[in-house]
Image (spheres, rainbow, N blue to C red):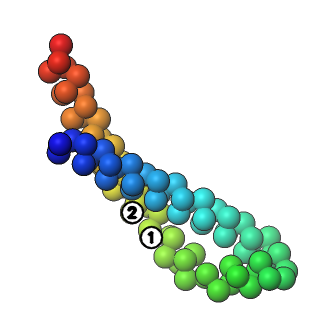
Amino acid sequence: MKGKVLVVIKNIFCIITILWSFLMLFEYTFVLIGVPGIIYEVFDFCILFLYLGIFAVPTLFIVSAILMAVTGKNMKKRILKNY
């Protein structure tokens, strides 16, 4: 049961990391290109997410990488235990 919970937590962190990275890529692209209009105003409002993303994406990546390593190690133990 403990392994399944760890896999679910790992998957959640990986999905959050991918979504946040995609949002940051999209937002940085629009800010750097300087698209005028309502889209720029929306992303100008979300400038806090840009600054937060500088620290959040690497932190989420490190947590996800640690969880992937631990989960992989646990799965390898289960596979070897079954043989």
Dividing the picture into quadrants, the one containing residue 1 is top left
Q: Residues within 10 Å of mark 2 (few under 14, many from 20)?
A: few
Mark 2, residue position: 59
Is residue 51 left or right of 45 when viewed as pictured? Answer: left
Q: Secondary structure at mark 1?
A: helix
Query: Does residue 2 appear left or right of residue 23 in this picture?
Result: left
Residue 13 point in image, percent of width and height: 39, 56
Question: In the image shown, does 45 or 83 lie closer to the viewer?
Answer: 83
Disc 1 to disc 2: CB gap under 8 Å: yes
Task: Name the outermost residue toward the top.
Answer: 83
State the residue at coordinates (46%, 59%): 16
Residue at screen point 70% across, 82% down? 42
Q: Amino acid at mark 1?
A: Phe
Q: Secondary structure at mark 2?
A: helix
**Residue pushed farthest left?**
81
Which residue extends farthest front? 1
Mark sitting on residue 47: none
Residue kind at label 2, given as amino acid type = Thr
Q: Position of residue 39 (x, y in %)?
A: 77, 78
- Residue 16 higher or lower than 41, as above or below: above
- Return the residue at label 1: 55
Question: Considering depth in this image, is 51 or 39 the residue closer to the camera?
Answer: 39
Write the residue at 83% across / 75% down. 35
Q: Residue sitting at 72 percent across and 75 percent down?
A: 31
Where does residue 70 sit, x and y in percent of width and height?
A: 25, 42
Q: Is residue 26 left or right of residue 8?
A: right
Q: Position of residue 68 (x, y in %)?
A: 33, 43
Looking at the image, is 73 positioned above or below residue 12? above
How many badges with numbers are in the image? 2
Q: For the residues marked 1 and 2, what is the alpha-carbon distance in whole angstroms?
A: 6 Å
Residue 36 lies left or right of residue 41; in this view the side is right
